[in-house]
Image: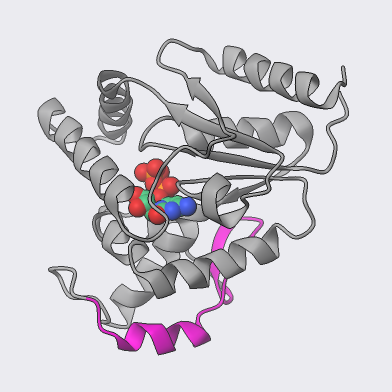
Amino acid sequence: MKVPDIIIAVDGYSSTGKSTFAKLIAKEFDFLYLDSGALYRGVTLFARERKLISADNVIDPALEGALASLDLHFGKEGTFMGERCIEKDIRTLEVSSQVSPIAAVPYVRAFVDAKLREFGEKGRIVMDGRDIGTTVFPDAQVKVFMTASEQVRAQRRYDEMVAKGETPAFEDVLANLRERDYIDSHRETSPLRRAADAFELDNSDMSLTEEIAWIRGLIQGKFGIL
Ligand code: CDP
């Protein structure tokens, strides 16, 4: 199946499996996968290392000017800050716990949006996030909005943490998920919401094979290809 040079936007709630699905799409159709959340995490790491965010999430306004010197991009091994691979550093619990307040700041969103649009210029990309189909690429030819039941999402995140050797309480995982979704859906700038022309994918009871069959069908129908 020869898919045209389009942009595929994958948005949705926490732990719906957006990045797993987007990576699979990239492999299946030979697209470039871009993880928008990694850039918000990169800005968070930068703010932490420059001491521009306090432990209780007070953000120093100097962050805005400092961003001019921040070179974030994607390389072979993942996310880079200049020459330095930061893929591991941006996935720590410390960064995860401060990324949402950082991602709610309008000038941070403008900074990340500009980079994402630059990376997406050539097309043939699949990008996942919270506002790709609504704000970053409102003209994306294929938009997916992922959902799954809260119980299923909390169970996935719980299993992920247990696999990493952590011992969280299920109720805490569920509460954290609800809180992050609430913050992401209620912030003023580019809140998480389904674009009017996005196709909803509830993968509560779906396998990855079924998810790929679903997107293949969608693309075939849309572009009249086999
Ligand atoms: O993997 P997970 O869904 O937990 O998060 P992520 O995709 O790595 O994104 C980290 C955080 O960045 C999210 O919790 C959002 O607050 C924010 N984000 C955003 O605001 N807009 C995006 N397009 C992507 C991420």
Magenta segment: 59-83
Q: How is the image coloured?
A: one colour
Q: Is residue 108 left or right of residue 19?
A: left
Query: Which residue: 42% across, 75% down?
Result: 107
Q: Quadrant of residue 56?
A: bottom left
Question: x%, y% of residue 40?
Answer: 42, 61
Is residue 138 found left or right of 224 in the rendered image? left
Asked if the magenta segment contains residue 14, the reply would be no
Which residue is drawn at the image coordinates 28% and 50% (left, top)?
A: 186
Query: What residue appears at the point 72 percent right and 16 percent down from the top-left corner?
Result: 217
Q: State whether residue 210 is above or below residue 68.
A: above
Q: Is residue 74 visible?
A: no
Judge whether 213 appears above or below 66 on screen: above
Residue nearest the viewer, comparing 212 with 196: 196
Please indicate whether residue 91 sits to the left or right of residue 114 in the image. left
Looking at the image, residue 205 sits to the left or right of residue 222; the answer is left
Q: Is residue 174 visible?
A: yes
**What x and y, as percent, mark residue 93?**
26, 53
Q: Nearer the viewer, residue 9 or 46?
A: 9
| Image quadrant assignment for residue 115 | bottom right
Expressed as whole percent of the image width and height from the top left, the position of residue 212 reads 64, 20
